[in-house]
Structures are given as C-alpha cells and as structure tokens.
Image (cartoon, rainbow, N blue to C red):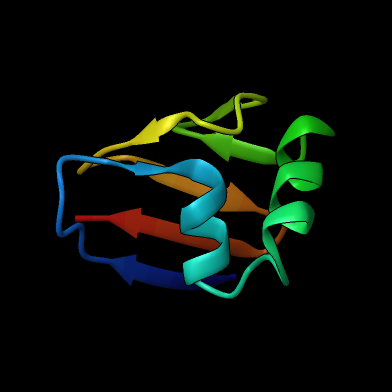
Amino acid sequence: MATIKFQLKEEFIPLIQLLKYTNIAESGAHASEMVVDGFVYCNGQVETRKRYKVKSGDIIVFENETIEVK
C-alpha cells in the first residue's frame, strides 16, 4: 500500500481536487466517478460527496493508495 503525504496550503481542499493533484485520478471526471461510485474512504468511512472538504488530519484511501493530509 502506497502512502502519499499531502501538505495543505489552505484550510481545506475539495476531495476530487485532492484525488487529481495526487495523480490518483486521471481527471476531474474520473475523480468524481470514483467518489460517487463509493470507492473512496475518508477516515475509514465511504465518502460519496465530491466536494467534501478534506482538512488536516484526514486520511483518504482509494484501493491501495493512502493520502495523509497534513
């Protein structure tokens, strides 16, 4: 399982943007599809809101990729 450490520059980042910036999703449309289809977890819970505000301390998981948000 790969772990990506992502440093926030603002208070939060929308979930689909985070997936794009970390290259887990190929595009915004791909990121939206991943989230809506229930494949993305935030802090151990399925997250289906595309605009979910990811904040410092959140852990996002998609398949074998983990993003630790600082």
- Residue at x-position 49% and y-position 54%: 17
Residue 69 spot, x, y in % from top left: 29, 53
Q: Which residue: 58% across, 75% down?
A: 23
Task: List x then y, in percent, for residue 39.
Answer: 76, 41
In x, y percent, where is residue 46? 64, 26
Question: Is 43 positioned to the left or the right of 20 in the image?
Answer: left
Q: In screen coordinates, is 67 left or right of 36?
A: left
Q: Which quarter of the figure is the C terminus placed in?
A: bottom left
- Quadrant of residue 45 in the image? top right
| Residue at (31% x, 69% y) in the render | 5
The quarter of the displayed image where residue 14 is located: top left
In front: 51, or 3? 51
Which one is nearer the viewer's eye here, 58 or 14? 14
Viewer-closest of 1 and 8: 8
| Res 26 quadrant in image | bottom right
* Image height of 46 relative to 63, above or below: above
Which image quarter holds the N terminus? Answer: bottom right
The residue under the point 81% across, 44% down is 33
Q: Position of residue 11 (x, y in %)?
A: 15, 40
Instruction: Answer with left or right where residue 8 lies relative to residue 14.
Output: left
User: In this figure, what is the number of numbered marks?
Assistant: 0
| Left or right: where 59 falls relative to 56 | right
- Residue 38, compared with residue 14, is above or below; it is above
